[in-house]
Image (cartoon, rainbow, N blue to C red):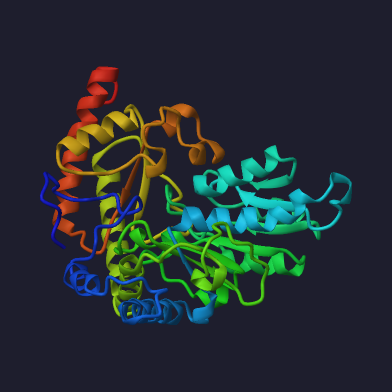
Amino acid sequence: MTLPSMNVKAYLDHNATTPIWETLYEEVPKWMKSWGNPSSIHQTGRAPKNILREARKQIAEYLQVSPLEIVFNSGASEGNNTVIKGLAEKILLEPMQHRTEKCEFMCSTVEHPSVLKTYQWLENKGLKVHWIPVNQDGELSLDFYEQHLSEKVLLVSVMGANNETGNVFPIAKLCQLAHQKGALFHCDGTQLMGKAEFDFTSMNVDYATFSGHKFYALKGIGFLYIKKNLPYTQLIHGGAQERYRRSGTENTFGIASMGYMLELMAKEKNKILTMQLLRDDFEKQVLQRISDVRITGAKAPRLANTSHMMIDGVDGETLLMNLDLEGFPVSTGAACSSGNPEPSPVLLSMGFTRDQAQSSLRVSLGWGTEKQQLDLFVETLEKIVKRLREIKHGQKYFN
């Protein structure tokens, strides 16, 4: 895949965002000719409306759901807020003494900030949230989950895969247990697309959110899956778009790019295995060439493209900047938290110390990542880690 015209030897931050897929550059100009408003009933609106209809069909076919269960929006952050706040609204409007049934929530401690902060907002409003802990391998505590999952729980939120560590969670099992107690299940599926094999229908979730820029489509676009006949309260009011479920003129080109990419993704499943083989070889090289490195969640199910590690004796932000100068964009965690001097809340919730969390590095591969790029990256990483350790600790690691 052609990299942007900058000093990038290998882009290794695909969990933050993916490059626009190369063949999309050919398609977008075609869609731009259909510039009308898809809500218009005159001729300029017909082609855009057909674009939306086709994309909705492509997405529904990929997930094996009804097209009417797909709602287009700006991305997973909006979708997560829509689901959680929408279901909580009725409870918040009730007097405290009347909140006797279905007034509690459950959420994992390693969710994306758009989920964590929304539930923290609910807590500040007086609602009960059960926070599902994880261990140092990133695995959810099923004992805690089953113990606190009661008939009072209205909604459970657990992501399909963690954006920092790559941990993949047993959504089908968690959802089945939730349904047995009469609870609804919401899954942030953003990181699953193009990075893991998953059967959406067997997951049987009630709500799911996705962002196009995580699977090589355009930015600022996403979609929300809502199982038929389930409760839903729109977050954005206005026009009749999306059957009154999400007002605002649709992002036609962005929506088309998602449909295009999911249709392509259905034909490119081999890319997931390729990334996993590259990732495993990369981790093997790192462990052989650099001492005191811990691969996070190595024994647990992970996304095929993600390698999260803690490198003793280095500061993650300093390492990131040095790697970037050498042409290797990587990250220390969630892109939406970049610039925050505090260590990752995800890693702290997993039981790691502040020092351990601040020595983290996330490498996330993409469809276009090549072995030669990773080999060069390992060489560069080894040199930089050695230099940073010498600066910070003298000869501690090399005596």
Residue that lies at the very extreme toward the right in this rendered image: 97
Please give the name of the residue rendered at 20% of the width and 38% of the height, measured from the top-left corner.
324
Is residue 109 visible in the rendered image? The answer is no
* 171 is higher (above) or lower (below) than 48: above
Q: In this view, does 53 lie above or below 81?
A: below
Q: Which residue does the image show at 50% across and 44% down from the upper left?
A: 113
Number of numbered callouts drawn:
0
- Residue at 30 percent across and 80 percent down: it is 267
Answer with left or right where residue 120 lies relative to residue 277.
right
Q: Where is residue 381 in the image (x, y as percent from the top left)?
A: 21, 39
For this rendering, which residue is in front, 166 or 336? 336
Would residue 310 appear left or right of 372 to someone viewing this image? right
Residue 67 in the image, given as x and y percentages of width and height = 49, 80
Q: Nearer the viewer, residue 32 or 92?
A: 32
In front: 192, or 240? 240
Q: Nearer the viewer, residue 126 or 295?
A: 126
Q: From the top left corner, tell me how far across and down residue 51 is, in percent.
A: 34, 78
What residue sits 18% from the left and 59% below the top?
370
- Residue 72 versus residue 18 in the image, above or below: below
Quadrant occupied by the C terminus: top left
Q: Quadrant of residue 157?
A: bottom right
The answer to whether residue 268 shows anywhere in this view is yes
Residue 89 % position (x, y): 70, 53
Which quadrant, please, contains the N terminus? bottom left
Q: In this view, does 223 lie above or below 141?
A: below
